[in-house]
Amino acid sequence: MTSTFLPDRRTGPGTAPPPPPAGAARARTRRRVTHWLTAVGFQLPALVLFLVLVVLPILFALYAAFFRWGGFGMPSDYVGTENFTRLFDDPVFLGDLWRCLLLVVLSLALQLPFALAMAVLLNQRMRGRAVYRMLFFAPYVLSEAITGVLFGMIFAPGDGLADRVLGGVGLDGLGGEWFADPSMVMATLFLVMTWKYFGFHMMLYLAGLQSIPRELTEAALIDGAGPWQRFRNVTLPLLAPTLRISVFLSVIGAIQLFDLVWVVTQGGPDHHSETMAVTMFQFGFKRYQVGYASAISVVMFGISLVFALAYQRFVLRRDLQGATTTMRGDGK
């Protein structure tokens, strides 16, 4: 006996499957709501702190920049854009911009190449390289206050360690008032900055160098490439993402530099080592011109923001796109 099975017309080709039971749909909705509430619950404390400690002070500084305000009570003496007009007519602030640019150029031209050279050297097989790494990174661990006091004693005129060493080798003429001479103060300050921060960039470069597969450099060596060719054609391109991050941190740090300068020179002599952050502190907490200091802080924030967005858009775009596709699990 044969039986014939007729297809169900409701499930034929081109027909939508039957809707799931109402209970299953409600369960999926509850799971989505639970996941969303869990994510919000974990992120809410950080968002509240970010709002209170970052966003609100920025907005209040922008508001106070349009007032002549001494810092007591609420701002009430509205002056419009007078603080910003005064800002760009102030030779001290214009000098701050020039000194910021000078520090950026010196950092990119001297400090970072020096850190890269030390990283390449300490990436080689050599005795005691762990000790050298620790010694070079140790200054970064010290606080800026300790560093400032230390170099204040080293470069003390006359009886400081620097003058004594120069005198011991017959170079007395090279010593002098390191932080008191307007023609020497920025060079001496940059030397202190290099001692303090180059170890951080060196460790960044070391981490990047150790992530490069050794097989690539060995293949270049087999192909007859010399040390410089291997560095230029293999190491440097693969280290480029680390270099870009290092440059970004160096520039932002130069724009916002305050504590080391304040401890060492307080902006002297006669504003020749002053930075934007030091000028802002002077007017806000020494002269009680908080409205004008707020205008300086707004300009600093604007410069940092424009640089960060432009750098991300034109320099870090490929690195960020790679990170995004990796997080998504997309191999394309």
Image: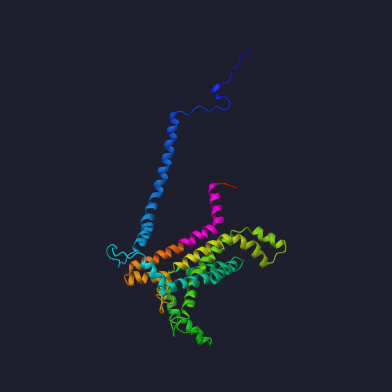
Note whether residue 258 is visible. Answer: no
Instruction: From the image, give the main secondary structure of the stretch colored magenta.
Output: helix
Note whether residue 9 is visible. Answer: yes
The residue furthest left is 73
Q: Is residue 82 left or right of residue 223?
A: left
Toward the viewer: 133 or 251?
251
State which quadrant residue 217 falls in.
bottom right
Identified at 43% across, 42% down, the residue is: 35
Q: Is residue 250 left or right of residue 57?
A: right
Percent x, y of residue 111: 53, 70
Q: Does residue 38 sit above or below 286 in this rendering?
A: above
Q: Does residue 136 sit above or below 62 in this rendering?
A: below
Toward the viewer: 227 or 108?
108
Percent x, y of residue 130: 55, 66
- Give the extent of the magenta segment: 305-328
State which quadrant residue 110 falls in.
bottom right
Q: Is residue 176 magenta?
A: no
Count the numbered circles shown. Answer: 0
Q: Does residue 129 sit above or below 18 in this rendering?
A: below
Toward the viewer: 56 or 219?
56
Looking at the rendered image, the quarter that the N terminus falls into is top right
Q: Is residue 320 magenta?
A: yes
Identified at 66% across, 64% down, the residue is: 230
Percent x, y of residue 36: 42, 43
Percent x, y of residue 40: 40, 46
Identified at 52% across, 58% down, the residue is: 312
Toward the viewer: 34 or 127?
34
